[in-house]
Amino acid sequence: MPAVPAAVLAIVDAQVRKLCARYAKRLPFHGWHHVSFVRSKAVQFAGANGAEVSVVETAALVHDVNYLVRRNSPAAAGGRLRQDMLARAGVAADTARWIEDVVVEAEMANRGPDISLEAQALSDADTLFKALPVTPVMLSHRYLAENGITLRELADKIVGEQQDKHDEGYYFYNTEAAATYSRWAATNLMLWQHIRESLDDDDVTDLLDAVNAHAAAS
Ligand SMILES: [Fe+2]
């Protein structure tokens, strides 16, 4: 029997969908579109690496509830809400603690080369979302709005948190994911390094100030 039975997982799914629908305006980046992508990919990575799939799937569903608790917060800020949701859905207490550990272990800012198989599957899925070529084009401005940070702060965060994982060879844990997606990750990291460089040019910051003033006025 899976650690999270299918009927219990369905309740967690329904809870998260409901929260994402109710607070869609507060979650333009980390809403259901993000959760469902990460869930789908995490399940595939868990199937490939032998992780406990139901734990990974449940962890993926609740991994970003911290953004409902506090803007621009770490995963741990969602711990209490996450545990309440899991308890209400009927997840066993020891499994709920396991899920919490997986979520915190998988977080980009903290993760190391040797994390559990479950955290590896979740991390690869969440990291892939960050590295998708469409993410900076279609979604990054939503991250800025959701979390109330500047473009420079986001560029510093991305390069600061991701470059060492890329350079040290554990950007992706799954070797097939690494082979398939590392080019996208390298392109994405280079883009954000270049964005950071461009922000040192006063004419570029003037340009962005003018764009933002226009957006605020319209
Ligand atoms: Fe995420």
Image (cartoon, rainbow, N blue to C red):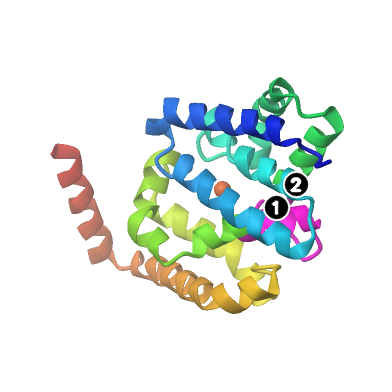
Task: Indicate the quadrant where residue 174 lies.
Answer: bottom right
**From what the image shows, is residue 1 above or below residue 186?**
above
Q: Quick one: which residue is furthest to the right in this view?
A: 94
**Residue found 34% across the figure and 56% down from its top:** 138
Name the residue beneath numbered marker 1: 106
Please provide percent x and percent y for residue 43: 65, 53
Q: Position of residue 104 (x, y in %)?
A: 72, 45
What amino acid is labelled 1 in the image?
Ala
Q: Quadrant of residue 108?
A: bottom right
Asked whether residue 118 is drawn in magenta, I would say yes
Please name whichever residue, 153 or 5, is drawn nearer the observer in this view of the structure. Answer: 5
105 to the left or right of 151: right
Q: Residues in magenta?
A: 105-124
Mark 2: give few (<14), some (14-19) or many (20+) Cα within 10 Å.
many
**Is residue 186 rendered magenta in the image?**
no
Task: Inspect the image, locate mark 2, and give the three-letter code of the amino acid beneath it.
Answer: Val
Q: Residue at x 46, y 53 (%)?
A: 153
- Label 2 to label 1: alpha-carbon separation: 6 Å
Residue at the top extreme, as displayed: 88
Of the 4 image quadrants, the one containing the C terminus is: top left
Could you classify mark 1 by the number of other residues whose Cα lies within 10 Å: few (under 14), some (14-19), or many (20 or more)? many
SS at circle 1:
helix
Dot 2 corresponds to which residue?
A: 102
Question: Going 27% across and 59% down the picture, which residue do you hit?
Answer: 205
Q: Position of residue 119 (x, y in %)?
A: 74, 53
Residue 70 shows in the view? no
Cβ–Cβ below 8 Å for labels 2 and 1? yes
Element assignment for label 2? helix
